[in-house]
Image: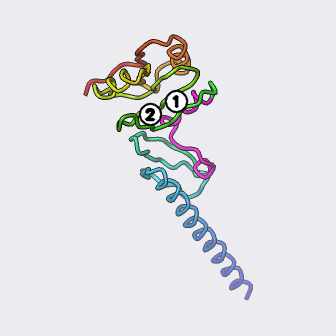
Amino acid sequence: LLLLLKDLSIFYNYSYLILNSILIKMNIDDIISEHNGLIINSADNIFEEWEIKCSKDHVFKLMGIDLKRGAWCMECDKIDNILKDFSIDYDKDKKINGIEFKYVINSNNRKFIIDDGPLTNNKFKIAQENKYNLIIVYDYNVDNLKDKILEALKNNKESTYIGQKLDY
């Protein structure tokens, strides 16, 4: 009888772990789907890293617990975090004349568009017609990205390019 109870206890614990793991994976799957991401490698629990590709094709790893807390692709969030550090009000993914720009700043008589490449002639023309200064970020990993964006905002130049433009 004791052996049977022990076996039942082990079975119960094992079943609980499997069920819990399935529920966690379903929850993480939902989070990734909400961001239009793709799971490259899943983990067995929330304390292990999941490898994910975001909708912008950035590949990154995060623990399931961080995903549940709202963390997401650091490449996509870099400029968001920089602008928040500067306490600048901006609109994200805003359309001007039917063309979508990544970040649009309209504050204190200053008008900026921060976008990542490629800069099409159409985007450039719309920015000029609407009197926006352009900051084009070609490389999110460039040294001192935050300082370079701040410098571009202070200098108020018509166009600033950060990082090396990649030719495809």
Contact (CB < 8 A) between labels 2 and 1? yes
Q: Quadrant of the C terminus?
A: top left
> Disc 2 vs disc 1: which is toward the camera?
2
Residues drawn in magenta: 65-84
60 or 161, nearer to the observer: 161
Give the spatial CA distance, label 2 vs label 1.
10 Å
In the orientation shown, which residue stands out farthest toward the left? 168
Identify the residue shown where x is 50% and y is 40%: 73
Q: Which of the numbered marks, if any, corresponds to residue 40?
A: none
For mark 2, what is the residue?
102
Secondary structure type for disc 1:
helix
Give the side of residue 139 with respect to residue 74, left or right.
left
Asked if 25 appears above or below 141 in the picture, the reply is below
Q: Using the image, determine if residue 59 lies above or below residue 121.
A: below
User: Disc 2 residue type?
Assistant: Lys
Residue identifier under label 1: 79
Which quarter of the figure is the N terminus placed in? bottom right
Question: Residue at left 46%, top 47%?
Answer: 52
Q: Amino acid at mark 1?
A: Ile
Q: Residue at x 50, y 58 (%)?
A: 29
x%, y% of residue 133?
Answer: 44, 19
Relative to the observer, which residue lies in front, 12 or 97?
A: 97
* In the rendered image, the vertical position of residue 17 relative to residue 84, given as above or below: below
